């Protein structure tokens, strides 16, 4: 599928109204600064569509983008470090959990993004278990492969694969747009 249009629709601090029209959702989740917004921009080829930041925890809402007038890309807040302390972190965690726990009648795919260099954090593994527990259709994407040399990358991808218990992974680089077409094909299948 080719993305011909992508527009910001809304940012919502709750799940109220997020699932109203029944269109499919492709939601991106990952720790703060893993590259969720950069991935959305690379996939849609719209620079600045999803706001990126050098500071962790910039996304504070469920940011929804309508793609080809057919489905939504949803940029979920990151987890881990968040400006504003534990109260803000708890609020964002609750928002993420509410979104993931919602029993949506329409098609919903969750893309869990993991940093290639860092590997899966305990939070990433918790989210993976949550996705499995809620019976969600999900993809594990491994971003920032451009930060590793080939030998390191091969070793790290093997390590990530084993830590995820054999769950299929899709390595790519949002920055270099390497293997973005493969990721797009997977999320729109």
Image (spheres, rainbow, N blue to C red):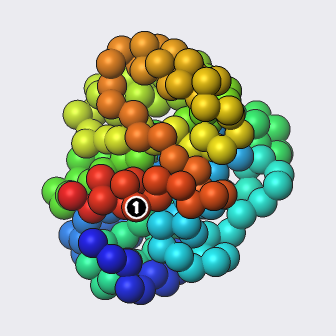
Q: Residues within 10 Å of mark 1 (few under 14, many from 20)?
A: some
Mark 1 = which residue? 181
Vertically, is 151 above or below 94?
above
155 lies left or right of 136: right
How far across and down, in percent of the image, does residue 52 sit? 71, 63
Give the residue displayed 30% in from the left and 53% down from the top. 186
111 lies left or right of 8: left
How far across and down, in percent of the image, does residue 33 sit? 71, 46
Give the residue displayed 78% in from the left and 60% down from the top. 53
Q: If the image is split into quadrants, where does the C terminus sit?
A: bottom left
Give the residue displayed 37% in from the left and 54% down from the top. 182
85 lies left or right of 102: right
Residue placed most toward the observer, 120 or 76: 120
Residue placed most toward the observer, 180 or 138: 180
> In which quadrant of the rendered view does residue 156 lie?
top right
Vertically, is 20 above or below 81?
below
Vertically, is 42 above or below 80?
below
115 lies left or right of 22: right
On the question of residue 116 being in view, the answer is yes
On the question of residue 87 being in view, the answer is no
Give the residue displayed 39% in from the left and 34% down from the top. 169
Residue placed most toward the observer, 57 or 89: 57
Vertically, is 97 above or below 179?
above
At mark 1, the secondary structure is helix
How far across and down, in percent of the image, does residue 129 sit? 38, 23
Report the label total: 1
Q: If the image is split into quadrants, where does the N terminus sit?
A: bottom left
How far across and down, in percent of the image, does residue 137 sit? 25, 42
């Amino acid at each position: 599928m080719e993305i011909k249009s992508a527009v910001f629709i809304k940012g919502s601090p709750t799940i109220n109204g997020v699932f109203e029209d029944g269109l499919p959702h492709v939601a991106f989740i990952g720790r703060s600064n893993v590259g969720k917004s950069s991935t959305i921009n690379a996939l849609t080829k719209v620079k600045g569509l999803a706001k990126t930041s050098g500071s962790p925890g910039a996304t504070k809402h469920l940011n929804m983008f309508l793609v080809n007038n057919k489905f939504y890309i949803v940029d979920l807040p990151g987890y881990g470090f968040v400006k504003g302390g534990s109260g803000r972190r708890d609020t964002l965690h609750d928002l993420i959990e509410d979104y993931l726990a919602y029993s949506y009648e329409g098609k919903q795919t969750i893309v869990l993004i993991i940093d290639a260099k860092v590997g899966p954090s305990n939070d990433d593994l918790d989210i993976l278990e949550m996705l499995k527990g809620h019976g969600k259709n999900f993809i594990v994407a491994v971003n920032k492969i451009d930060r590793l040399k080939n030998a390191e990358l091969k070793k790290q991808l093997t390590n990530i694969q084993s830590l995820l218990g054999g769950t299929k992974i899709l390595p790519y680089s949002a920055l270099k747009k390497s293997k973005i077409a493969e990721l797009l094909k997977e999320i729109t299948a």
